[in-house]
Amino acid sequence: MALIVLYCVIPFYWMIVSSLRQPSEGRSTEFIPSPVSVLNYKGVFAGGNAFGRALINSVIVSGTTTVLTLLFGIVAAYALARLQFKGKGAVLWLIMACSMFPLIILIPPLLKMFSSTAPFQWFPNWINTYQAVIVPGLSFGLPLAVWNLTAFFKQMPVELEQAAMVDGCTPAVAFRKVILPLAAPGVFTTAIIVFIGSWNEFLVALTFLTDQDRQTATVAISKFTGTTGFDTPYGSIMAAGVIVTVPLLIAVLLFQRRIVAGLTAGGVK
């Protein structure tokens, strides 16, 4: 376990150390920066990088994708967990199969569709729009949400809804006031995982968001330029990596108990 932890932590430590060096020491191999400098962090938000706007775009895309995934995923998962109909297992496996397509093979047809080229002239032009990244994000986030939440809802006794309806609740009210609050750990876990996946997404955003005002943080980092236009700004890239990683790391550490509870839900009756 110690070796695994070191394997995961050392690259992150190296990223922090590299971000705290002088910009001219981008290729240094020292394990401790001397002297410590924050110039790389200032360079991240230089006007040409437009990194502040990129962070806002990432928040908009990731937040919207997460909210929509939860809205659709909760309803679908609850239906699969409670309703009895033929082929329910096949439907669940079909939903999971949708997430198994390699992303790279979906980019060409999506590009033709979103750019309104033949044979998709009828489709609105979505290039350089948020929905061009949000909709593909839903196609990968929803299977995870449905699968995870279905297991969570299945382990909840159906008597909970029945007792609420005896007290006068409709099925919708029983779900909203009884089941949904109890499902908070699973919902929260799903939200964190979907948000992280959307936050780190690169290929779709790089393809469909060509305008600098619409680029997400991951795309903006890949296009950082040096002071002369020819050198690689290693320090600024590392500093930007720290900026986009630390908030997610803090969130996972703060809510790790909820995340573990949500992931293990349904494993034990």
Image (spheres, rainbow, N blue to C red):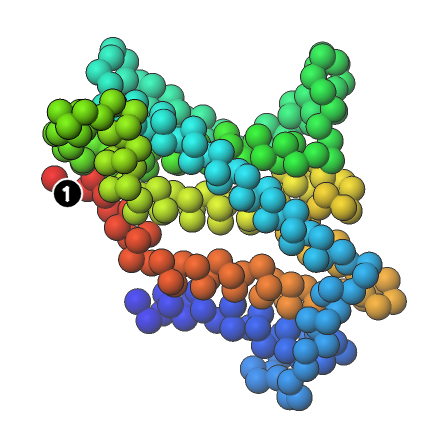
Picture residue at 30% right of the left edge, 33% below the top? 176
Asked if one can make out residue 153 in the rendered structure from this viewpoint, the answer is yes
Asked if one can make out residue 93 in the rendered structure from this viewpoint, the answer is no
Mark 1 residue crowding within 10 angstroms, few (<14) / some (14–19) / many (20+) = few
Name the image quarter holding residue 42: bottom right
Quadrant where the C terminus lies?
Answer: top left
Camera-side residue of 71 and 238: 71
Q: Residue furthest bottom?
A: 35
Picture residue at 55% right of the left edge, 49% below the top? 200
- 95 w.r.t. 152: above or below: above
Identify the secondary structure beneath mark 1.
Answer: loop
Name the image quarter holding residue 63: top right
Label count reads 1
Quadrant where the N terminus lies?
Answer: bottom left
- 9 w.r.t. 151: above or below: below
- 28 w.r.t. 230: above or below: below
Picture residue at 34% right of the left edge, 19% below the top? 91
The residue to which callout 1 is attached is 268
Q: Position of residue 69 (x, y in %)?
A: 46, 34
Picture residue at 70% right of the left edge, 34% below the top? 129
Q: Position of residue 262 (x, y in %)?
A: 29, 46
Q: Residue furthest front?
A: 168
Name the image quarter holding residue 230: bottom right
Q: Position of residue 217 (x, y in %)?
A: 65, 52
Camera-side residue of 234 and 269: 269
Q: Residue furthest right?
A: 228
Horizontal side, residue 173 vs residue 155: left or right: right
Q: Identity of the amino acid at label 1?
A: Val
Q: Position of residue 28 (x, y in %)?
A: 67, 79
